[in-house]
Amino acid sequence: MAQETQHAWTIAEANTLYGIREWGNGYFGIDDSGEVYVTLNRDVPTSTISLLKIAKGLQERGLKLPVLLRFSDILDDRIKYINESFLKSMKEAGYRGTYRGVYPIKVNQQQQVIEEIAHYGKQYHHGLETGSKAELIAALAYMDDPKAFVICNGYKDEEYVDLALRGLSLGIQTVLVVEMPGETELILDRARALNIKPIIGLRMKPSTIAGGHWTESGGDRSVFGLNTTQVMQAVDVLKREGMLDCLKLLHYHLGSQIPNIHAIRIGAIEAARFYAGLVAEGAPMGLLDIGGGLAIDYDGSQTNSSSSRNYSMKEYCDDIVEVVLGICNETNIEHPTLISESGRALVAYYSVLLLNILDTNAFSTELNLDDITPEMRPALENLLYVKRTLNPKNTQECLNDLNYYREEIRTKFLYGSVNMRERAMAEHIYWSIMADIFKISREQDYIPPELRDLEYHLSDIYYGNFSVFQSLPDVWAIDQLFPIMPIHHLEEQPSRHAILADITCDCDGKIDKFIGRPEINRTLPLHALPDDEDYILGVFLVGAYQETLGDLHNLLGDTNVVSVTYDEQGTVVLHHELDGDTVADVLSYVEYDPKHLESLVRMKAEAAVREGRITTHQRRKIITAYTAGLRGYTYYETDQED
Ligand SMILES: *Cc1c(COP(=O)(O)O)cnc(C)c1O
């Protein structure tokens, strides 16, 4: 739907409209020419680059959209930020322990991420958290810092336990965290068998319920962790076996994206009490692991809505440090090393998905009365009367009449007394009046509830070259909101309101909830498509949880992936990391053999030649098209030739 009057539009208004200053966190913004930029290092001015320039650079190299951009400098900045924030809070509070972060591999398992964290994080002794054998196997290869921890969570079989124990012999501080009652004995058995002294942790079930999307991990109903009775039983087993001196760590995890600082405080208080209790039982302890949950402000609102958080990094660190310090001093015990397992807060800013718009379905509400022929008039008379008489005083009445008359025409159509052209024109008149009503009600202070969704119903559909299921699975699965906006033309006022559809042809393959204030917006303000170039949107903050949850809905595969860094001269460097899946790739994931497919088509073409339906020349064309299709990108391929 078109917006009304244009006026002199400013970049400041674009900033406000898309909220980029709020969610961009200093990494993303709009430059003077109306393009979105990324700042790779917030301390280095020359590390700022326009995303459009990156997109153009890629297109020059023949790399097609959609493409996922990764910024390892931003990842480094996040690691630095969380470590220095904790250390600062500790220093200010007079805390006598230290901080050791561990990154939970499941949040983004890409090799690049793990390598970067192990490498850059080494100066802070940042470690890794594993939830499975496979993750531990990756962690053991990349960690080589005797001061960093590898926290082993998740259900454990003998092999997982053995690998963790062998990690200790390699000089890596692997901590085996008991998640369920039987694991204590398993760990002790294997430790004896291998003659390696384990470092043991206990995962408690906090009774704090944290709110937000992902909080099933907290509370008594959580499937992970030990309840109070089970914690005591584990302690008793360790005592009985003379192994209590291996108990060093207490772990809890309230859930991910905890929007409210209050829940974080309460959780920390409960955990600190358990920690003190374990020290009182005679365990050496020394490590308190507060899990993940540190939230990202996806909508920039700084509230306790599920897409946001009502606290800063500083408050998060200050509160945890203060709670633990207070309870330790009160109970006269040493201040533990604090470990946190922040994943989302480390990697969310790391990736941006760029996608091009392929087409739009504009909702036209312009009515040209000349299109109504005299034969149609009798059927449409009532609707046209509503159109003529609508004014600000009778909108509600008109709305009621309008719905009544449309229903009447639909019924008559079923009985054959209204024909298809008449019905089509009736629907068109209906929407043109709805648009009139919407305009009138917007000019008034009060919009009746029935009309609040009108903007949504009158919006355009913009078809984006992407798959929600592959690239943004949480949009589909849990209605997560990500910031989405055009990466260029921001010096112009957007004139359309649209929802985004992907190319999966699935009715769930769409995005119709966008960040907005005070509430969620059902449509996104966008520009009319430019004639001479791609219109490109960015989906931001997609570094956490999206990449490996994605699936092959409609056989749309992985997108192209490019890493963006800068060198000492401040020149941008694009590393083409990964080609997106080809059609042959995705077909083979679901057990097709591309060679076999090709031979089946060859045989069909042969038969057609034999039966004289096509020429040999046509046969060659068909086969070339088929094999080129197999080799091609699964997404819509625009512009350049191969
Ligand atoms: C998923 C998970 C995390 C990561 O949580 P974030 O909210 O992404 O920081 C940390 N610890 C455990 C045990 C987890 O399951």
Image (cartoon, rainbow, N blue to C red):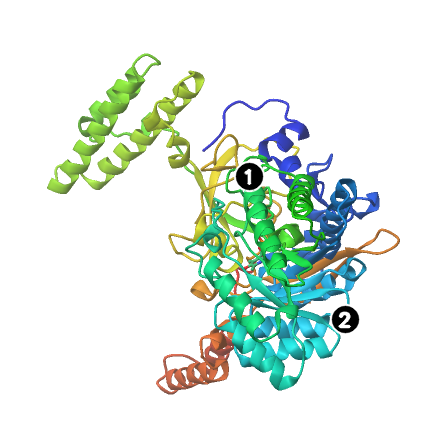
Q: Quick check: 415 left or right of 602?
A: left
Quarter of the image holding residue 341? bottom right
Q: Which mark is residue 262?
A: 1
Of the residues shown, which amino acid type is indicated by label 1?
A: His
Q: Residue at x 50, y 30 (%)?
A: 518
Q: Point out the image quarter for the C terminus.
A: bottom right
Q: Is residue 203 above or below residue 442?
A: below
Q: Is residue 390 above or below residue 75?
A: above
Q: Quick check: 455 left or right of 26?
A: left
Q: Residue at x 44, y 57 (%)?
A: 222
**Front residue (pair 402, 312):** 312
Of the residues shown, which amino acid type is indicated by label 2?
A: Asp
Q: Point out the image quarter for the N terminus.
A: top left
Please give the residue where the numbered disc 2 appears in the rendered image. 144
Q: Earlier in the sequence, mark 1 or mark 2?
A: 2
Q: Position of residue 515 (x, y in %)?
A: 52, 38
Q: Residue at x 41, y 37 (%)?
A: 363
